[in-house]
Image (cartoon, rainbow, N blue to C red):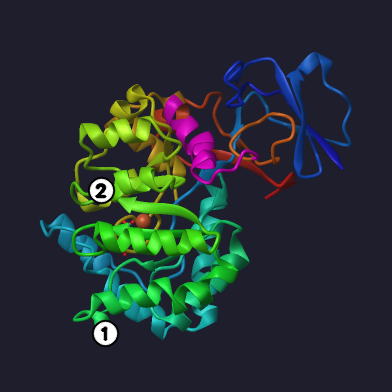
Amino acid sequence: MSLIVTNIGELVTNDPEHNVRHDAAVVVDGDRIAWVGPAAQAPAADLRLDADGAAVLPGFVDSHAHLIFAGDRAAEFGARMAGQPYTGGGIRTTVAATRAASDDELRGNARRLVGEALRQGTTTIEIKSGYGLSVPDETRSLRLAAELSAETTYLGAHVVPAEYADRPDDYVELVCGEMLDAAVPYAKWVDVFCERGAFDGDQARAILTAGAKRGLGLRVHANQLGPGPGVRLAVELGAASADHCTHLDDADVDALAGSDTVATLLPGAEFSTRSPYPDARRLLDAGATVALATDCNPGSSYTSSMPFCIALAVREMGLTPTEAVHAATAGGAAALRRTDLGRISPGARADLIVLDAPSHLHLAYRPGVPLIRHVLQHGAPR
Ligand code: NIG
Ligand code: FE
């Protein structure tokens, strides 16, 4: 079946030559974009979607989310808003709730969040484990994640669980050994929370290297709560993405700018932990590739909304609306090393959104307003 999207007020393609077009139509064939060009020259198609003068964009690519968990931590959020700092210590609370939950509870919660994200325009979402932290609980987390996304990430190295508190090196050995063996069939990526209080540079290097040997791509939670070795380690090891990037020195910025490692910024986390926002302007001006993602998780960023992250990036991080939309689409695709996502051009996957607005500027201009009118995912209306 083919489908033509007509009457497009503004088309954001992410094609550097023709990023924003005003005369265009899009033809979708099956799950792919087949044709983009002037509406007057559009080929015939079986079905028609009338955009009614609205903006059409690539679906959002949320390259960082922690969706396999049980419970919430609203009380912890409330305490933070009354002045408590965020330390990551609450991760263990979610680990206990997740271990106690049934598969159906975890599956239901993750499905709910994927649906919530889809209604806000997210057509691809990466899903991490990391609230199991035992061999069976990390394995089932990844098995459930793989039911919902092809972009699954093994985060056994989220924190050292309580039962290993006095022997963290034994836990690192488990993460690099038996737990990794069990994770590999369900995981595409390996990630480490490289931070004071979680895993240091040497431990992170051991875990990432072990994952790479088993064929997993690399991602790093880096420089979130303070300066540290995470960003430079990510670049040195050729990670697809260094995520958070909140506390960067000049050498970190230069390393990112001179590499293929994407700087994935997660402003929902700064919002929800009352931390200073990362400087997206500095990264872009230096030549780094920047992605925006939600970090959706019950502790530091309980939002599934890419439009919310776009609005924060524009207001608080120095991006223009056009740059923020690019980071939320093409940037996320680059962070997942996916050339078929985050663009509207022939051959790309037919993931696109029609806004309830004439321009992509409205995503930041009208914050908090539900502006996603239609979503096509793999060419199918959702
Ligand atoms: O990306 N920083 C580490 N992990 C998550 C937070 C997890 C939690 O607080 O439950 C993050 O922000
Ligand atoms: Fe995270």
Say which element carries label 2.
loop
Between 16 and 74, the residue placed more toward the observer is 16
| Left or right relative to 37: residue 22 | left
Q: Is residue 144 visible?
A: no
Residue 271 pos. (x, y %)? 27, 47
Q: Which label was assigned to residue 223?
A: 2
Q: Which label was assigned to residue 125?
A: none
Q: Label 2 is placed on what type of residue?
A: Asn
Q: Please identify the residue farthest to the left as the structure is shown.
A: 83
Q: Is residue 268 above or below residue 207?
A: above
Between 56 and 14, the residue placed more toward the observer is 14
Q: Is residue 128 above or below residue 305?
A: below
The stretch in magenta equals 323-340
Between 218 and 14, the residue placed more toward the observer is 218
Residue 249 pos. (x, y %)? 20, 36
Query: Residue 339: within the magenta?
Result: yes
Please identify the quarter of the rendering in which residue 69 is found: bottom left
Q: Label 1 is placed on what type of residue?
A: Glu
Most frequent secondary structure within the magenta stretch:
helix
Please identify the quarter of the rendering in which residue 8 is found: top right
Q: Is residue 300 visible?
A: yes
Residue 311 pos. (x, y %)? 37, 35
Between 303 and 250, the residue placed more toward the observer is 250
Q: Label 2, label 1: how many angstroms apart (C-alpha)?
A: 26 Å
Residue 141 pos. (x, y %)? 49, 73
Say which element carries label 1.
helix
Query: Residue 149: within the magenta?
Result: no
Q: Which residue is labeled 1 in the image?
A: 163
Query: Which residue sits at x=40%, y=28%?
Result: 365
* N-term-proximal mark, 2 vs 1: 1
Contact (CB < 8 A) between labels 2 and 1? no
